[in-house]
Amino acid sequence: MSVKEMNKNYDIIVVGGGHAGIEACLAPARMGFKTLLVTSEIGKIGMMPCNPAIGGPAKGIVVREIDALGGEMGRNTDKSAIQMRMLNVSKGPAVRALRAQADKVQYPAEIQKTVLAQANLAVLEAGVEKLIVEGGAACGVVLDSGEEVTGRAVILTTGTYMTSKIMISDEVTEAGPEGTATSSSLSTHLRELGFDLFRLKTGTPARVDARTVDVTGLERHPGDDAQLAFSFDTTEFIPLSEQLPCYLTYTNASTHAIIHANLDKSSMYSGVVSGVGPRYCPSIEDKLVRFADKPRHQIFLEPESRSMDTIYVQGFSTSLPRDVQQLMINSLAGLEKAEIVDYGYAIEYDAIDPIQLWPTLETKKVAGLYSAGQINGTSGYEEAAGQGLMAGINAVLKLRGEEPFVLGRDEAYIGVMIDDLVTKGTLEPYRLLTSRAEFRLLLRHDNADVRLTERGYQVGLVSDDKYTRFTNKMDQIEAEKGRLAEIRVTPKAGVNDFLERVVNSAPLKDGISALDLMKRPEVSYAHVLAMLGEDSAAVSDEVAEQVEVTVKYEGYIAKAVQQAAKMKKMDERKIPTDIDYEAVPNLALEARMKLQDVRPLTIGQASRISGVNPADISILMVYVDAKKRRG
């Protein structure tokens, strides 16, 4: 759509067509609100400038949560995956996570079809110069053509495109990822509005021609031969025979010598980079400096697409000169003759200090203005998409005059991420990790729909059909658990022989229910069915998994729920938004400053602010209670 063809008035305007922008525009449109997506290039919507992979620890669970709430990322990943693997299968259910290698060409193509076909959603190819702000509220945008478009809410999802610079050694180019256009005017305008911005840095490795790589002798990493999917709606699964393998190689002494000899030519170590890089995904130069004692580092060779002969050299991000990159690549086993198709680079960009956001992702300085994704200091497609979905939902709810939609730390990894950002802020690209979640046993891959489908249905993003399938599944889980609780297993010879010979479990001395027998760590749901001589296909795999996990971990889950309830009580104790922290006596100076910056909405949120200690919380609680009594 061109500017001339465009309607000039919308309910919600979304700026940026990355993974945050996609969810941020689809959600309001599907909730019945007239939405406009403004993006610099329609053909770049949903592009994957870094690794074309979705999921992994914590991140994969976020994708499941997005799907349970009615978002798009999971469905699109399932359609475009070239490999699926479940990680940490040998470990407990709290850390299992799905990871897909997505097709770099097919993924954006499929998502563009979805976005362009969505009712209530218009897509405009243009740049945004600044916001229209009246009476302290966002009410539109000014395009690079000078045209104005009005809206009742604006969502910024500019990713790494604000005043971005691509750096290869001392060569600096003002551009976004893969040479796309950048914007400096929006950064300037946000500063004029009083926002604190800071510089962040990330990077990407070289891509090599797959036809010049010799995988003979390298460790092969295939996908899983199982029906795996991110979306609860997916019914067609990619068979193992159609999945593309990845391969593992390692850096070596030669690689390290090349890097050390040229370290002063790296953008990061030559003084070109001013932004803070990601701690959990550092460049190979940074790895060698920080982990000088390690003789080698893992490097994964990951195919980018079925239609491209390119391999992403995962773990080899760099901003060293092109000739040095070629030497580095050729020093790796299997890549001795590899030819680089695209060189690695560092990218630096502006981000908003997320402490300036409410838990709804609405900014505190400008009402009706939301921000989501890497503009908020995060890294990763999944974190961006989760924020975009929440910003889109909350923009709609505010326009409806309804209560905001905020997920608790015990409800979703999305809730953990947003609470971390708006409460603690970040000084580096934020990456979601399982260790950030206090209640990760509650936030599992297998139960994302149990946690969130009802919430998605309530806000209007989950269809009636999907909700009916969900409620039927829940009924089946409870029915199967009830059935197993009624079945009595007695210490007969056949039973004890099965337990000892097949399961390597102690024989029964007394009768026990089939449900209680399954609480033994070594006894699975499949074992119980086999012992009873029953068909394992009587219920779906999803129902079977939920029955087994909830029964086996019942005690741990109950304890986590109890702990979460205590935290929830703290989060239910509201703090008046107009509180003057200077008037609260006896607060420590650091606590007073932090509370003033964050302006927490609840006592629970206040307790999670760095620098606010338990004594400060006690003082604050007394003050708030006294203020409420005074009216």
Image: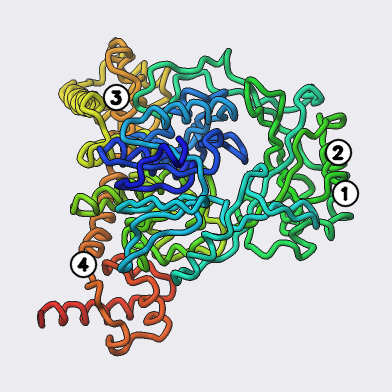
Q: Quadrant of residue 502?
A: top left
Which residue, given by chain and number where applicable, does mark 4 sit on? Answer: 573
Determine which of the numbered discs, if any, sits on residue 331 in the image. Answer: 2
Name the residue located 36 percent from the left edge and 76 percent from the top edge: 595
Q: Which mark is residue 543?
A: 3
Please tell me in which quadrant of the rendered image residue 309 appears.
top right
The residue labelled by disc 1 is 258
The label nearer to you, 1 versus 3, is 1
Q: Earlier in the sequence, mark 2 or mark 3?
A: 2
Cα distance in 3D space between marks 4 and 1: 58 Å
Q: How is the image coloured?
A: rainbow
Q: Position of residue 446 (x, y in %)?
A: 36, 33
Tell me the quadrant of the picture where the C terminus can be found: bottom left
Asked which quadrant contains residue 552, the reply is top left
Say whether disc 4 or disc 1 marks the residue closer to the N-terminus.
1
What amino acid is at disc 1?
Ile
- Distance between the Cα atoms at labels 2 and 3? 49 Å
Secondary structure under tag 3 reads: helix
Label 2 sits on a secondary structure element that is loop
Q: Where does residue 162 sit, x and y in percent of width and height?
A: 56, 56
Q: Residue 407, position in %: x, y?
A: 30, 51
The reply to whether the C-beta atoms of the residues labelled 1 and 3 are less than 8 Å apart is no
Q: CA distance from mark 4 to mark 3?
A: 37 Å
* Amino acid type for the residue under numbered disc 3: Val
Q: Secondary structure at mark 4?
A: loop
Q: Earlier in the sequence, mark 2 or mark 4?
A: 2
